Amino acid sequence: QCFEEKELSQECRDFISSLPRERGWIRAFSHHYQGFWISTMAIQGVLAFQKNFQAHDTDVLLVTPPKAGTTWSKAILFALLNRARHPNPQRHPLVANNPHTLVLTLELNLYNGNQVPDLTSFPTPRLFGTHLPYALLPASAKDSACKIVYMCRNPKDTFVSLWHYVNRAWSTSSAIDSLEEAFDMFWRGVSPFGPYWDHVSGYWKESLENPHKVLFLKYEDMKEQPTTNLRRLAEFLGCPFSPEEEAKGIVNDISTLCSFDNLSNQEVNKRGKGLYGEANEVYFRRGEVGDWVNYLTVEMTEKLDRITEEKFHSTGLKF
Ligand code: A3P
């Protein structure tokens, strides 16, 4: 992983030298690329992913804005797609592995090095994560029959979760001193893979125009009705639960396996380390809807509500 500009390839450094940039949330910078803010840590992987990824028709891409429930939805999709292979919840890979090591993120874990990764050994259906906005996805991801599952979360909880994550995971390299400063950046759209609103509305639009290609899910709906949304997901992915699976309670088993309480209490997630050496526990904080109320001032709330209303007004999207 390249955290600083000097660690990037010369080609990447040359390329980003022409891009507008702002201070990053974590070390180095945020680079304004094709209308979105990409951190120095992610930019090389983003460029390589765009250039080299060849989607298969059977692929499943999980897309999230950071802090919108990536860890949870990785667990859910992994458990759903591999349910026949791992029928025993006690011996499930999610008991011994953090979801981020089971489902890798294309730009951050696979295309981030100096070599183009060989993805041919991944079992079908290949399941990958990405934070890329729809507009930035490689052509083959858009043009092939691969499925895109998008999970997002209301902007206030997404922001508060991001703020906590940066402080908890990157305390020594966080570039942001206060909640107010973080808020100002998020509100101006300068957040990882942001502007948040453009990220969400890009996939929302696609999900309306192409519902067999893009499934749009909200964290809040998944929290409220996990089993209904699991069934929706399974149908969308072409692997609906059979009557036998329903009778055995597999839908509930997957929901319980992937729940915040179950995952956050696994030893690997309490004490294990992630792919960058970060503590896995940073991916589990409260896992609730509406925790923003404990952090945002009235002014911040009004400001975020106003911009969200303005940006989503004509789209029909509501949080
Ligand atoms: P909070 O900071 O609000 O607690 P991401 O996975 O995209 O990094 O998002 C992290 C957020 O998802 C954190 O939110 C985290 O607690 C929450 N989360 C992690 N696992 C979860 C789960 N199994 N169910 C619900 N929320 C979960």
Image (spheres, grey):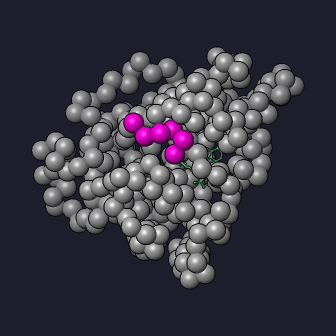
Q: Magenta segment: does it hold 208?
A: no
| In the foreground, 123 or 291 | 291
Q: Magenta segment: does it hold 279?
A: yes
Q: Which residues, given as a range, are shown in magenta?
A: 277-282
Name the residue: 56% across, 83% down. 299
Count the labels in the image: 0
Residue 253 point in image, percent of width and height: 77, 30
Residue 203 point in image, percent of width and height: 52, 55
Residue 267 falls left or right of residue 133: right
| In the foreground, 239 or 29 | 29
Residue 212 point in image, percent of width and height: 60, 43
Screen quadrant of the N terminus: top left
| In the foreground, 217 or 160 | 160
Residue 126 point in image, percent of width and height: 49, 27
Name the residue: 70% across, 49% down. 222
Q: Quadrant of residue 32?
A: bottom left
Up/down of 314 relative to 170, above or below: below
| In the foreground, 24 or 86 | 24
* Extreme-right residue of the structure: 247
Q: Quadrant of residue 250?
A: top right
Screen quadrant of the C terminus: bottom right
Q: Can residue 214 be seen in this view?
A: no
Residue 96 falls left or right of residue 44: right
Q: In which quarter of the image is residue 248?
A: top right
Name the residue: 65% across, 69% down. 293
Up/down of 248 relative to 49, above or below: above
Name the residue: 43% across, 40% down. 278
Residue 196 falls left or right of residue 254: left
Up/down of 216 relative to 242, above or below: below
Q: Is residue 69 visible?
A: yes
